[in-house]
Image (cartoon, rainbow, N blue to C red):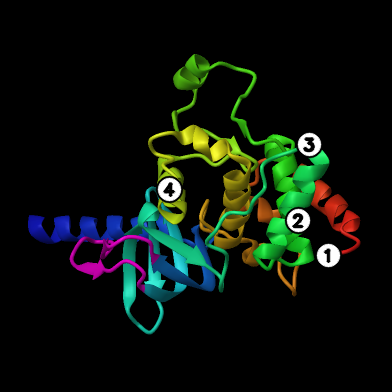
Amino acid sequence: MNKYKSSLLVVVFLTAVFFSVFFSPKDVMAESRSLTAIISTTAYKPDGSRTLSVSRGKTYGVNLVANAGDYWIVDLAGGAGRWKFKKADIDFHMGAYPLTLSNFKGGDRVATIKAIVSECHRFGLLKNQCAYVLATAEHESNFQPIKEAWWMGENWRRQNLRYWPWYGRGYGQMTWDFNYRLYERLTGIKLTKNPDLALQPNLALYILVHGMKSGAFTGYSLENWINSKQTNFYKARMIVNGLDCAGQIAGRASYWYRQLTVY
């Protein structure tokens, strides 16, 4: 076997390893949903061999999504193939959802809980889905639109949070620059110039519910784990942050489900 063939086999082997690691079932969300470009953008083949120009507002059916850093790897419906999109350039959604913010201006714990339930209604969530949204907001922020590590100063956050200044804010503690860019483009609010605008109660409310319904945060949505056929409050934690504190939050979701006697 000559040197060229040996090198080729090595490349083929490494490519196979790459796809087995980054596109294994545990990293891939198999779910039918839609993808809409929120700005005119360019998609790429994962190997960089081709590009696809996508105009603002263009919508595709999506059969598969893989989380790959700043990108989503998607299989477009209808045999259009696999493409790589910048996360900040597109939005995933399951059916229709509101594009406007509510009038909620903030309040105490009771007022915030009522506002979250109202927002869940606005987005058409099921009772079990709303219960998990409540549990998430309770765990992440205790129903207050706060900054991550709110008890520390900005210098501490700058030195200790690797995604500074795009650290957690709001009821769901949204992090990472691509999420701030996404919600700036969706709402028109200049979050990249002033990330603290994500602390506005009505915007924090929108981000919490929209992000969990659409799968914007991690690629997993409420529909993956909580729907009319199943209620898996434990695995639903993957919508926001892996399985961190999954059991604790699942317990609170069960509590909130019991409390939602009228929904």
Residue 263, percent from left and from top: 83, 64
Residue under numbered circle 2: 117
User: Taking the image as drawn, is residue 242 in sight?
Assistant: no
Q: Is residue 72 magenta?
A: no
Disc number placed over residue 106 in the picture, else none: none
> Disc 4 vs disc 2: Cβ atoms closer than 8 Å?
no
Say which residue label 1 marks.
263
Circle nearer the N terminus (3, 4): 3
The answer to which image quadrant residue 13 occupies is bottom left
Secondary structure under badge 3?
loop
State the residue in front, 184 or 214. Answer: 184
Residue type at mark 4 is Glu
Q: Position of residue 173 (x, y in %)?
A: 59, 39
Q: Are marks 1 and 2 in contact (CB under 8 Å)?
A: yes
Q: Mark 3 or mark 2, which is nearer to you?
A: 3
Numbered badge on residue 184: 4
Q: Amino acid at mark 3?
A: Asp
Sequence order check: which comes first, mark 1 or mark 2? 2
Question: Can you identify the residue that label 3 sits on?
Answer: 108
Mark 1 to mark 2 CA distance (whole Å): 8 Å
The correct choice, above or below, for 208 with respect to 125 in the image is: above
Q: Describe residue 24's horizontal placement relative to residue 104 as left or right.
A: left
Compared across the picture, whether 123 is left or right of 62 comes to right
Whole-Å distance between the Cαs marked 3 and 4?
Answer: 26 Å
